[in-house]
Image (spheres, coloured by chain):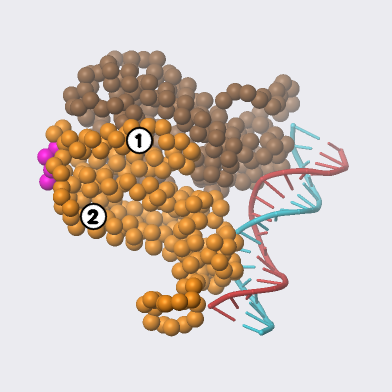
Chain colours: A orange, B brown, C red, D cyan
Amino acid sequence: MGGSEQEVRSRGSRAPETRDRIVEATIQLLAREGYGNITTRRIGEVAGVKYQLVHYYFASMEDLFIEAFRRGAEENLARLAEIAKGEASLRRFWQIHSDAGASKLMVEFVALAQRHPALRLEIAAYARRFRTAQLDFARAALERESIASDHIPPMVVLLLTTGLAQLEANDRLLGFTDGHDETRTWIESWLAANTTPVKE
Amino acid sequence: MGGSEQEVRSRGSRAPETRDRIVEATIQLLAREGYGNITTRRIGEVAGVKYQLVHYYFASMEDLFIEAFRRGAEENLARLAEIAKGEASLRRFWQIHSDAGASKLMVEFVALAQRHPALRLEIAAYARRFRTAQLDFARAALERESIASDHIPPMVVLLLTTGLAQLEANDRLLGFTDGHDETRTWIESWLAANTTPVKE
DNA sequence: GTCTATATGATGATAGAC
DNA sequence: GTCTATCATCATATAGAC
C-alpha cells in the first residue's frame, strides 16, 4: 500500500483511506455475506483495521450504513444517468436491471433498514428518486419505439421489470434460480423482435 | 416436508395451547414488526407466557421459525390448491398474488432465513414446490384462455407477477407505494379485456 | 489516529425448584 | 409445564494511554 498516491484529498493528513476502507468493507461484506453477519468486528477484520476504529469514524453503525448506502446509491444513479444519455430504448432500460450484484445489495440494505429507521428513510428517498428517473427513461423509450403489442404504461413496465430483478435476487438468496434463464431469454428475444435496435 | 415428528404432544389436557400460542405469536410478530424485533422475550410477551417457555417447546429459535413457517406455508399451499380446483384462468392466477399479508410474511421469512441455514433450506424447498404448482396453474390458464396478445410462456407470466407482488411488499417495507395502484389497475383491466370471464 | 481496555446491554439458552 | 435465577456470548459504544 505504499507507492504512488493519486488521492485528490487535499488535506494531506495521515492514513487518508481508513474511512474509505471501512465503508468499502461494509459494502463488500454486505454483498458477500449479507446483512446477517454485519458487525463492527467483521467490518474491521475485512478492512484490516481494529473494529473500534469504526466508532471513531462513525458515530453509530447506522451512520456507517447510511454512508455505505449513499455510495452505492450514487453509483447507481450515475450509471442510470449514463445510460439515459444515449437514445432511450427498452433494451437499454432492461440493461439497468441486469446487474445482479446491485439487486442483491439493494435487498440487503432494505433488510438492514428495518433495524435502522434513519437508513430506511434514506433508502426510501433514494428509491423514489431512482424510480422517478427510471420512469422517465421508460416513458421516453416507449414513446420512441413502436411496440408491436398493446401499449403498456411506463409505470407497468417499470414495476414488472424491477419486480423481476428483485425476485431473482431473492431466489438467489434462497439458493435456487428456477426459471430465471428462461424468462430472461424470452424477454431478450421479445425485445429483439419488438423494438428497433439502437446503435452505440 | 414430512419426516421427523419430534414431539407427539398427546397430552391434551394440560395447557394444551401454549405451544400454539407461541407459534401464533411468532407469526403475528413477524407480520407486524418484522424479523428485526423477533426475540424470545417479545414472543413470550405477545403469547402471554414466560419467554423461557419458548425454549421448553422449541430446542432453538430456528426450530420455532421453521414450525411457524411451515404453518404459513401449508396455508398458502392449501389456498393455492383451493383456487386450482376451479377452472384455470389468468384472473384467478392473479388473485393468488393479491394477498399483501402473505407476501410480506414471505419477505420476512426470507430475511430470517439468512441467519438460519435450516430455515433457508425449508423455505427454498417450499418455494420451489409452490412455484411448480403455480406454474402448472399458469400453464393451464394460458392454454385454456385465448390471449389476444403474443403468447407468453407460463414461466414468464409467473415470474413477472410474483416479482411484482414481491416488489410491492418490499416498497411497503420502505414506506411508499408509488405506482402500485396504477399497475394493478392496468393489469386488472388488461385481464378483463384479454381473457374470458370465468363464473364462480 | 490508533491502540488497549472496558462499560453496558440484550440475546439465546440452561439449571433446578415447585 | 411453568416458574425463578443465572450463564455465556456477543453486540455497540466509550475512555484513556500513546
Residue picked out by circle 2? A83
Residue at the spot 20% in from the left edge and 27% down from the top edge: B150
Where's residue A153, x and y in %? Answer: 19, 40
Which residue of the protein is positioned furthest toward the front in this rendering? A3
A119 relative position to B64: left or right: left
Chain ID of residue with mark 2 = A
Q: Distance between the residues labelled 1 and 2?
A: 24 Å
Where's residue A120, x and y in %? Answer: 43, 55
Specify which label sits upstream in the sequence, 1 or 2: 2
Local secondary structure at mark 1: helix
Q: Which of marks 1 and 2 is in front?
A: 1
Chain ID of residue with mark 1 = A
The reply to the same-chain question for discs 1 and 2 is yes
Residue picked out by circle 1? A181
Q: What residue type is labelled 2?
A: Ile
Region in magenta: A143-147
Residue at the spot 42% in from the left edge and 25% down from the top edge: B132
**Quadrant position of residue A126:** bottom left
Q: Is residue B20 magenta?
A: no
In the depicted view, which residue is nearer to us: B178 or B64?
B64
Residue B87: which disc?
A: none
Is residue B84 shown above or below D11? above
In the depicted view, which residue is nearer to us: D18 or B11?
D18
Q: Using a 10 Å C-alpha cutoff, classify the residue at mark 1 as few (fewer than 14 neighbours), some (14 to 19) or many (20 or more).
A: few
**Quadrant position of residue A166:** top left
